[in-house]
């Protein structure tokens, strides 16, 4: 395609946008709202996933031992645990050490323990770390079956709940996004339909003088893409601003919450939204061209 | 140049617009297509432009088999044809120059060639001095001349005109016919559907008369042959 032809296409698209500015604004706003919601869901789902997997990697398995095992038995169990797949570190904590830690944690309230007298109800234990989150579950199950082991625990409930929540949000978000994308498509194809209608004379003449299909269609496609891109740009700006503010606030007050750092995360989200917006624009106009322009 | 062999066109509602039409038009001919309204003149022209496809028969326009042609090749057929309508079909928001240049723009002609060619054809139709004028500021005859300039700017081998003088007074019609005659003398084939008895009778060109979808008369140096 010649540069001059491309210039012509863009000029046609822009002048047509100017003529139908009201419909244009409606299209851009619809795309912006739809993509903003899409973006919010993306950010939310990705962050929840991130939080869940961060927690998961930090998970360790605590193995409680039965009372009355000999040192040799316990060493034996320790060696067996070390040999399990994915296990990277096994630390033995004897019951006295556990008591000291427990007292530390109670702090000023350790007076409560005086009622126990000299007895130490805490068991001997191992703290086991694995290198990948997916090893946590099998490793803890395997350990639970070893002889002399009372039980093996990790924070599975919390993590499983988090993942379930992410899944639910993902499904709900997906449904919402599909509806909004359809609405955006509908509005854009309507806008383009009005443009096609307004320029039907011109289109007719173009056909008679031998313009090719794509020559007739491209200005309308460009118009749709400009609408979609502009809507996406609005969504990106609002989303970036909101996320930046949110992460700052979270770092100030809830520093332990592992949110995804805004760079390069926001860049990636922005690219996705801009591409989706432009694609919705192109698709919207091609739907309308197919239906209303027999070339 | 144009070869129609037993061409029929039946519309989906069952009405027969053309029935077994056979006609041969050679390069450089000037042909009037006459007939009452609804006789099939418009369908005849639509087939040539491949706006409609024949139901049966064989149709070759400028060496191209119109029936077997792929949709993507249709624009290239149309580039070898120039079309003029009764209602001019100019773009009101473009100047005379831009209206004519538009036809070259859509076929992506080089700018230099475009400028030269647009001025040449505007000279030919006698409107060189009105390049910057808008269609609404022109008379009907002038508008039709712009439309003719647009039809011939891409050097078509055939010019197809559908009632080009239908909206014009006799004097202006005559002016327009002189323009067509000039174009024809330069070697371009002209096919014109018309109701204009005066024009047909005065020009004495080939006349094809269509009635109820059939060719009933095909005369060299013919006359209109109907009462107006």
Image (spheres, coloured by chain):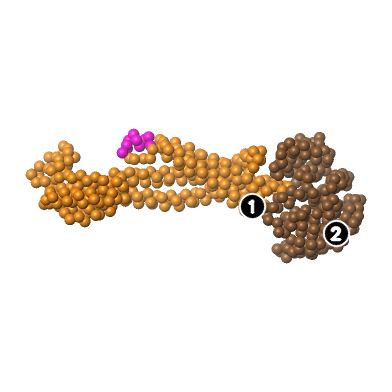
The kind of secondary structure the magenta stretch mainly shows is helix
User: Mark 1–mark 2 contact, CB under 8 Å?
Assistant: no
User: Does the rendering let one see residue B134?
Assistant: no
**Residue at numbered disc 1:** A292
In the image: residue B26, left or right of residue A244: right
Chain B drawing hue: brown
Residue found 49% across the figure and 51% down from its top: A179
Q: Quadrant of the C terminus of chain B?
A: bottom right
User: Circle 2 — which element?
Assistant: strand
Chain A drawing hue: orange
In the image: residue A197, left or right of residue A229: right
Residue found 34% across the figure and 35% down from its top: A251
Residue situated furthest left in the rendering: A118
User: Does the rendering let one see residue A224?
Assistant: yes
Q: Which residues are magenta?
A: A247-256
Q: Nearer the viewer, residue A94 or B172?
A: A94
**Residue at numbered disc 2:** B209
Residue B153 magenta-highlighted? no
């Amino acid at each position: 395609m010649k540069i001059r032809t491309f210039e012509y296409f863009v000029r046609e698209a822009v002048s047509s946008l100017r003529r139908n500015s009201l419909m244009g604004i409606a299209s851009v706003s619809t795309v912006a709202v739809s993509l903003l919601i899409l973006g919010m869901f993306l950010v939310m789902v990705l962050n929840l996933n991130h939080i869940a997997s961060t927690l998961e990697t930090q998970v360790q398995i605590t193995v409680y031992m039965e009372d009355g095992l000999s040192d040799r038995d316990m060493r034996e169990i320790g060696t067996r645990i070390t040999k399990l797949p994915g296990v990277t570190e096994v630390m033995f904590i004897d019951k006295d050490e556990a008591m000291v830690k427990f007292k530390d944690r109670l702090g000023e309230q350790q007076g409560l323990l005086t009622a126990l007298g000299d007895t130490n109800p805490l068991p001997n234990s191992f703290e086991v770390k694995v290198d990948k989150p997916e090893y946590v579950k099998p490793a803890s199950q395997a350990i639970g079956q070893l002889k002399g082991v009372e039980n093996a625990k990790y924070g599975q409930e919390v993590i499983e709940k988090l993942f379930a929540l992410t899944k639910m949000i993902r499904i709900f978000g997906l449904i919402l996004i599909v509806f909004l994308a359809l609405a955006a498509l509908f509005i854009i194809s309507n806008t383009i339909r009005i443009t096609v209608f307004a320029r039907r004379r011109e289109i007719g003449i173009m056909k008679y003088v031998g313009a090719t299909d794509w020559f007739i269609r491209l200005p309308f496609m460009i118009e749709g893409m400009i609408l979609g891109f502009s809507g996406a740009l609005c969504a990106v700006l609002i989303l970036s601003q909101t996320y930046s503010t949110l992460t700052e606030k979270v770092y100030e007050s809830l520093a332990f919450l592992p949110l995804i750092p805004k760079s390069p995360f926001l860049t990636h989200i922005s690219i996705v939204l801009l591409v989706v917006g432009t694609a919705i624009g192109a698709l919207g106009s091609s739907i309308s061209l197919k239906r209303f322009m027999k070339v | 140049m144009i070869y129609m062999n037993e061409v029929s066109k039946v519309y989906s509602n069952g009405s027969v617009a053309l029935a077994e039409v056979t006609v041969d038009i050679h390069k450089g001919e000037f042909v009037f297509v006459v007939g009452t309204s609804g006789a099939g003149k418009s369908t005849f022209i639509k087939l040539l432009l491949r706006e409609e496809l024949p139901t049966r028969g064989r149709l070759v326009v400028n060496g191209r088999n119109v029936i077997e042609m792929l949709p993507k090749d249709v624009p290239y057929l149309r580039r070898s044809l120039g079309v003029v309508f009764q209602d001019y079909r100019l773009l009101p928001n473009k100047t005379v120059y831009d209206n004519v240049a538009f036809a070259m723009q859509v076929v992506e002609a080089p700018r230099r060639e475009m400028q030269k060619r647009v001025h040449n054809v505007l000279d030919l139709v006698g409107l060189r001095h009105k390049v910057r004028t808008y269609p609404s500021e022109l008379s009907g005859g002038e508008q039709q001349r712009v439309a003719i300039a647009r039809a011939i700017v891409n050097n078509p081998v055939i010019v197809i005109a559908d009632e080009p003088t239908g909206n014009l007074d006799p004097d202006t019609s005559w002016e327009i016919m002189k323009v067509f005659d000039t174009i024809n003398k330069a070697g371009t084939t002209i096919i014109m559907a018309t109701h204009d008895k005066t024009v047909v009778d005065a020009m004495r060109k080939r006349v094809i008369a269509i009635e109820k979808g059939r060719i009933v008369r095909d005369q060299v140096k013919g006359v209109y042959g109907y009462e107006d």
